[in-house]
Image: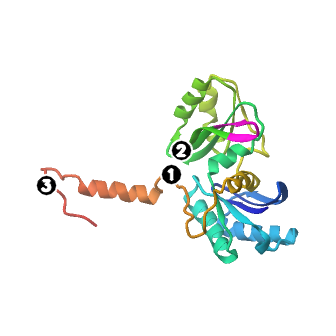
Amino acid sequence: MKILALDSSGLVASVAVVADDVLLAEYTVNYKKTHSQTLLPMLNEVARMIELDLHSIDAIAVAAGPGSFTGLRIGSATAKGLGFALEKPLVHIPTVDALACNLYGYDGYICPLMDARRNQVYTGIYCFENGCLRTLEAQSPMAVEEIIGKLNALGKKVVFLGDGVPVYQELLEKWMEVPFAYAPAHMNRQRAASVAFLASRYIKEGKTESAADHVPDYLRMSQAERERAEAQKRSAEPEKGGIISDDRS
């Protein structure tokens, strides 16, 4: 089983190829470039270095969200294009779940924190049991204070990772009541290898989809959608004097 994995859900762009549980190649960049500039060149370089015939892969795994709206669109479009061209199935991997897989074997709780802006994070709570990832709190957007409260209530040590950690580190250190730690540098951001690791389990469970069926998990409206909804709401509100505005543009 040979899996091509992509992750462009955040600032990190990552491409990996895994064959029968062996990581053949991984190319990860965390720098200020758009994924439209980096993802395909990274894939081409990986393929060149390991002499990969893309037709030899069995499935394309993609971190499908949540995350950056632009990053998710680029990753999903790339995966869909490859799926159509190569006639291969896609494996739809939750971004936060894949992040948790970076810390395989940790004996406490794992809490990824992706900065979602607007004083929220994309997060979840996980642990490993008998080598399998177990989800205690499914990925969702929430306030940092809320996830801290959930972790304190569970009463067990936890490790944090993700780009939300440096943003909210002061709050973590102020309000966490249980022992906690931060993942080291080689484990604290998205990695396509972790996407591939989780995809191998999904494939065994029959959790694949066609390129045509694949849709990212945004979990939240984009800023443009929120602004449009707010503008529509304002235009529908009564004007002073109780007259309904007729502006419906």
Q: Look at the numbered discs 3 and 1 and tell me whether their residues touch, using CB distance below 8 Å.
A: no
Residue 44 place in picture, x, y as percent: 78, 72
Label 2, label 1: how far apart the Cα atoms are: 7 Å
Q: Which residue is mark 2?
A: 140
Q: Amino acid at mark 2?
A: Ser
202 shown above or below 103: below
Q: Which residue is mark 1?
A: 219
Q: Residue at x 24, y 56 (%)?
A: 236
The count of marks equals 3
Count residues near mark 3 (Cα–Cα under 10 Å), then give few for <14, some for 14-19, many for 20+: few
Q: Secondary structure at mark 1?
A: loop
Residue 245 place in picture, x, y as percent: 19, 59
Q: Which residues are magenta?
A: 126-133
Mark 2 or mark 1: which comes first in sequence? 2
Quadrant of the rendered structure where residue 18 is?
bottom right
7 shown above or below 55: above
| Residue 125 lies in the magenta stretch | no
Count residues near mark 2 (Cα–Cα under 10 Å), then give few for <14, some for 14-19, many for 20+: some
Q: Which residue is mark 3?
A: 243
Residue 109 place in picture, x, y as percent: 68, 32
Q: Amino acid at mark 3?
A: Ile
Mark 3 or mark 2: which comes first in sequence? 2
Label 3, label 2: how far apart the Cα atoms are: 40 Å
Q: Residue furthest right?
A: 50
**Picture colour scheme:** rainbow
Q: Look at the numbered discs 2 and 1 and tell me whether their residues touch, using CB distance below 8 Å.
A: yes
Q: Amino acid at mark 1?
A: Leu
Nearest-to-viewer mark from 3 and 2: 2
Nearest-to-viewer mark from 3 and 1: 1
Q: Residue at x 56, y 29 (%)?
A: 150
Q: Residue at x 48, y 57 (%)?
A: 222
